[in-house]
Image (cartoon, coloured by chain):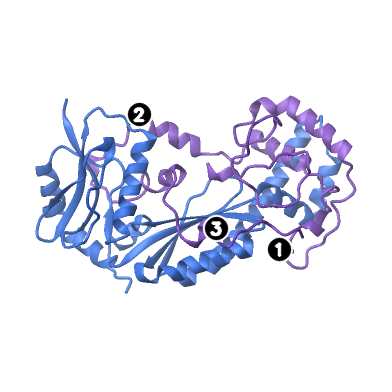
Chain colours: A blue, B purple
């Protein structure tokens, strides 16, 4: 059975990273490094299935690392044949690119806020706002499926407006406290917004306070989740073309 | 409105580690890639991703919205008075006057018709054990167990 190398991410070789990290399948995380860069990897079997736990290991390992140092995360699933290839591709071919990214994100972490409307609060609100919709609800025949679909469609439309408005509010409250903000895709009917914030590690308390304030402001109708600190997943593309610094 | 149980030391004071739902949207979608080595087509991931995708614009979903809206009992909970004034200048009328008896009838009918289609996020069986997440909405019909947040799975 072949053994492949799973790549978690890249940091400056001078960076202080946590010791004794454990990777997928409980195997130790190894460092492949030169004078400037270190690639964090661990071995996986060629035919290893991906389990939920593997995804979490990848994410949590990077979160542990980014708590202490700037890390450029790999997407999950970057598997390289051997150490020599890691060395060649990351430390040689991608060297300048990676050094540029590390410089651009120096001292930065990502935190992510997910806001979702509580179902009941959302439905109550759209019915309260729109008397015509409330009337439609009252008058629609429960046994008439087509009419119920029309009612549902009207509710869905009203919910979409409500979500949009709520998303604007959330972004307005959080954006000023971040170097940059990136909105992630959301899918759920009651998902308001998922926004990644790039913040300086040392100024994270400001973002924390903004999220706590927002939670107090909207907590009666929305649920917030606050995730991080993470490596700057959502912002990598922003600096590919130009070696931009957030400073 | 009724005061909510919101302790001062909630987890939102600090960010928390990623949950599975979070990683699907981050590490599978974003991050450094060196294309020739990516082998994400691994068993398991597809299922996870499909789990997370909810198609909003479908007949099924519309029926769910209708059902959810029909379930609301605006009378018993005091209607708009129970809601915070989220947005100013909105009329508070128009949704009153339904009887809970009529609503229960509707609900039962819909559970009968569509109950089988409900996924795990919907509440349609009262004998189900514990709610997964405490809703913060303070006012609800007493005989209903707490609804669960849809997007926290």
Question: Which chain hosts label 3?
Answer: B
The x and y percentages for residue B19 are 44, 45
x and y, in percent, of residue A247 in the image = 32, 74
- Disc 3 from disc 2: Cα separation: 37 Å
Q: Position of residue B43 (x, y in %)?
A: 35, 29
Q: Are marks 1 and 2 in contact (CB under 8 Å)?
A: no
Q: Residue at x 77, y 60 (%)?
A: B1
Residue A229: quadrant of the picture: bottom left
Secondary structure found at label 3: loop
Q: Residue at coordinates 56% horizontally, 45% vertically from top-left?
A: B151
Please check whether the numbered discs 3 and 2 fall on a single chain.
yes
Towards the viewer: B5 or B72: B5
Label drawn at residue B86: 1
User: Would you identify the image quadrant in which residue A34 lies?
Assistant: bottom left
Q: Quadrant of the N terminus of chain A?
A: top left
Label 1 – label 2 distance at C-alpha = 45 Å
Label drawn at residue A65: none
Q: Is residue B54 left or right of residue B87?
A: left
Q: Are marks 3 and 2 in contact (CB under 8 Å)?
A: no
Disc marking residue B43:
2
Question: Dot 2 surroundings within 10 Å: few (below 14), some, or many (20 or more)?
Answer: few
Is A172 above or below relative to A225?
Answer: below
Count of numbered badges drawn on the protein = 3
Q: Residue furthest bottom?
A: A247
User: Is A47 left or right of B46, judged from the image as shown?
Assistant: left
Mark 1 and mark 2 on one chain: yes
């Amino acid at each position: 059975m072949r053994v492949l190398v799973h790549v978690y991410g890249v940091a400056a070789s001078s960076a202080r990273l946590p010791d004794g990290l454990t990777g997928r399948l409980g195997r130790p995380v190894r460092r492949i490094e030169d004078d400037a860069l270190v690639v964090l990897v661990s071995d996986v079997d060629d035919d290893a299935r991906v389990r939920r736990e593997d995804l979490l290991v990848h994410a949590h390992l990077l979160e542990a690392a980014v708590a202490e140092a700037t890390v450029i995360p790999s997407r999950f699933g970057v598997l390289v044949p051997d150490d020599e290839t890691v060395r060649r591709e990351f430390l040689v071919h991608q060297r300048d690119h990676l050094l540029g990214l590390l410089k651009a994100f120096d001292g930065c972490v990502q935190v992510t806020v997910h806001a979702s409307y509580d179902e009941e609060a959302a439905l109550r609100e759209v019915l309260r706002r729109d008397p015509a919709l409330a009337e439609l609800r009252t008058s629609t025949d429960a046994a008439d499926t087509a009419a119920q679909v029309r009612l549902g469609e009207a509710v869905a439309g009203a919910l979409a407006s409500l979500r949009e408005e709520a998303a604007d509010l959330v972004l307005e409250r959080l954006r000023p406290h971040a170097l940059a903000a990136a909105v992630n895709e959301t899918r759920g009917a009651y998902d308001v917004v998922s926004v990644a914030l790039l913040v300086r590690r040392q100024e994270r308390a400001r973002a924390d306070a903004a999220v706590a304030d927002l939670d107090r402001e909207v907590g009666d109708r929305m649920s917030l989740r606050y995730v991080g600190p993470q490596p700057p997943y959502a912002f990598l593309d922003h600096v590919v073309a130009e070696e931009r610094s957030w400073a | 409105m009724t005061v909510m149980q919101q302790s001062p030391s909630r987890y939102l004071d600090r960010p928390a580690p990623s949950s599975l739902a979070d990683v699907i949207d981050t590490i599978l979608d974003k991050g450094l890639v060196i294309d020739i080595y990516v082998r994400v087509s691994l068993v398991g991931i597809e299922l996870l991703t499909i789990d997370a995708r909810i198609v909003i614009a479908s007949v099924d979903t519309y029926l769910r919205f209708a059902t959810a809206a029909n379930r609301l009992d605006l009378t018993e909970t005091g209607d708009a008075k129970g809601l915070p004034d989220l947005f100013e200048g909105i009329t508070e009328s128009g949704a009153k006057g339904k009887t809970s008896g009529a609503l229960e009838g509707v609900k039962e009918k819909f559970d009968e018709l569509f109950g089988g289609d409900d996924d795990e996020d919907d509440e349609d069986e009262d004998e189900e054990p514990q709610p997964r997440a405490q809703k913060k909405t303070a006012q609800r019909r007493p005989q209903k167990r707490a609804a669960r947040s849809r997007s926290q799975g």
